[in-house]
Image (cartoon, helix red, strand yellow):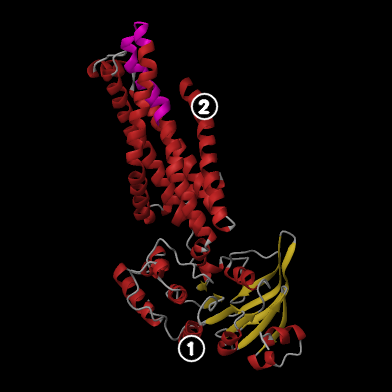
Amino acid sequence: MILWWRTLLAFPKLWQQRQKVFEQFFEIGNASLLMVCILSFFIGGVIALQTGPVLVERGLANAVGGVVGISICKELAPVMMSILIAGRIGSAMAAEIGSMRVYQEIDALRTMNISPIHYLVLPRLIAIAVALPLLVIFAILVAWLGGAFVCTANSRIDISFAAFFTTLRDTVQVKDVVNGVFKSFVFAWIVGVVSCHQGLITIGGPRGIGRSVTKAVVNSIVLIVILDYILTRILLRS
Amino acid sequence: MSTPTPHQQGIAVQVRGLRKSFNGHEVLKGLDFDVKSGEIFVLMGPSGSGKSVLLKHIIGLEDPDAGEILIGGKPTQSANVLEEYRLAMVFQSGALLNSLTVGENVALYLVEHHLKPPEEIARIVSETLEVVGLKGAEDKMPSELSGGMKKRAAIARALVIEPQLILYDEPTSELDPLSSVVIAEEIVKLNQRIHVTSLVVSHDRDLAFGVADRIAVINDGRILTIGTPEEVKRSTNPLVHDFLAARFDRG
């Protein structure tokens, strides 16, 4: 919480750090886009595969698109992509900052009166807070495509592409997508703050860096799952 | 700003009753000494005697349990000494940022504090690297440099700050004798050119007696003796004598 607050206080310095924000943003995109694409397509596909035959057998074929669409955008895309980013980007953040801490690079920054919060943490947090919601929007679209593909190709479901998206459009509202994107925005802060914090408190050489990376990923995932429940309760009420 | 101006003045450092413990183990046990403005002061002592911890206190990376450090007459705890004075530290490992090129490392202070336009920063970096014998190394990554080159790049990074006080942590450790001589020459040349106050922590006796105006010998968190190199050589303290005379003799 302290690191999050100190980062918020550093916001006026954001314009000066814009170059680093863009670098981090593109790094997150480059590192994650292909994996997001593959993961989302198959998540959409597997949800369609699990729910499609059951719904069709009960004469609810026109609900398949809606069920897949809602579950993807409200729950699976934000949670799965945040967990993916915690593993792929959070671990890299903790390792990089942890290595800089162990090898005295952060001390060197401080002796030059350069705040590690401004120089290292702020650009990473802003970049991940922008990149993760965008990745989630992309993931939702790809997962819907995956679901539609399975519904068309699987003989036990046998719903056309157009029928799938018609039922999806009738069921999924803009606020459902906004809910998912909002969740991912909160999760992005969690991954960023936890990973940067673990990096900054790293001690003890390469083994310490390994410990920090593990803690960053595990703590991020645990917090994502707990917060997902809390956010879902709050968003359902509203 | 070009390479440091010759009329620049160093600042004095006073250490008063400095104490520091880590996990119940007292590392600094009441240190008292002065470093005069513009002098090269070498702090010698065996490994683990608290030398590097002391440097971290002076630059503000650690807070003391008791005592105080005065820089330019002002206590470091009462103000942000790094904002008021230009201090620089050359770390034992160099501590260059591995993700940046040598040029970007040297330019970092000027870039992050927005002190100069980019063209001027490029010129200053080029000139400063030439001063430390690394002309044309701007685009190299730290991983491509030898130990001695890393130390010289770290000195270049410290130089662009135009420091009034520069702290060297084991500047010749892990270096071959020739590279050690080059670093020692850099320390003396820098002191002569800009009259910066230099505080060197080392257990390299050749470096200490070669560059120092005054030397302090520290052991187990206490100062054993302090004086000019000649005075320290004449010290009657048996621990100082043993430290300075220690030599491996196979015969």
Is residue A67 part of the magenta span, yes or no? yes
Q: Nearer the viewer, residue A6 or B95?
A: B95
The label number, if any, that marks residue A229 in the structure image: 2
Residue in the image at 59% along x and 57% along y:
A204
Q: Which residue is mark 1?
A: B192
Residue in the image at 24% along x and 19% along y:
A161
Residue in the image at 31% along x and 14% along y:
A157
Range drawn in magenta = A55-77
Q: Whole-Å distance between the Cαs marked 1 and 2?
A: 66 Å
Is residue A176 visible in the rendered image? The answer is no
Query: Residue B199's x, y, as percent?
Result: 58, 79
* Residue type beneath disc 1: Gln
Chain letter for mark 1, please.
B
The label number, if any, that marks residue B216 in the structure image: none
Query: Residue B219's x, y, as percent?
Result: 71, 77
The secondary structure type at the circle numbered 2 is helix
Query: Residue B104's x, y, as percent?
Result: 37, 66
The secondary structure type at the circle numbered 1 is helix
Is most of the magenta stretch helix, strand or loop?
A: helix
Q: Is residue A151 left or right of residue B219?
A: left
